[in-house]
Image (cartoon, helix red, strand yellow):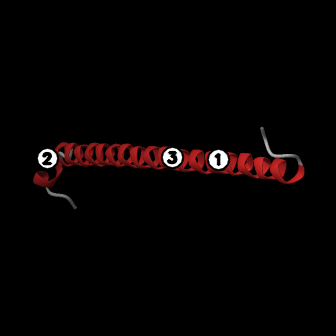
Amino acid sequence: MMSEEEKNVIHDYSAIDRISEEWSNREEEVSKEFKSRNRMRYAKGGVQKAYETLLILVGLGLFAILVAFAIRLVIYQPLG
């Protein structure tokens, strides 16, 4: 059986609960920071990829213009 002293003991876990809550808050802040950093990396990568795609399209456009000009010179009379 429990003695009188054991019945009067109060178990206070508020300190443990507070520490646990602080840990979870810190983990949440770290997670938000990592997500923010990852978004910045993806945004920079997206801008670079868009720039590369633009350069490729401009290059293909210039190539198509040169091919059209060459075909015109071969099939028709020279300009002028």
Q: Residue at x 21, y 42 (%)?
A: 18
Q: Which residue is mark 1?
A: 57
Location of mark 2 (residue): 8
Q: Residue at x 51, y 46 (%)?
A: 46
Q: Which residue is mark 3?
A: 46
Q: CA distance from mark 3 to mark 1?
A: 16 Å
CA–CA distance between discs 3 and 2?
65 Å
- Is the C terminus in the top left, top right, bottom left or bottom right quadrant? top right
For label 2, the crowd category at 10 Å Cα-Cα, with few meaning under 14, some 14 to 19 and many 20 or more, is few
Q: Earlier in the sequence, mark 2 or mark 1?
A: 2
Q: Foreground residue, 9 or 17?
A: 17
Point out residue 51 in the picture as x, y percentages from the top left corner. Answer: 52, 45
- Mark 3 vs 1: CB contact within 8 A: no
Identify the mark nearer the N-term, 3 or 1: 3
Q: Farthest residue in the front direction?
A: 80
* 32 displayed left or right of 5: right
Secondary element type, mark 2: helix
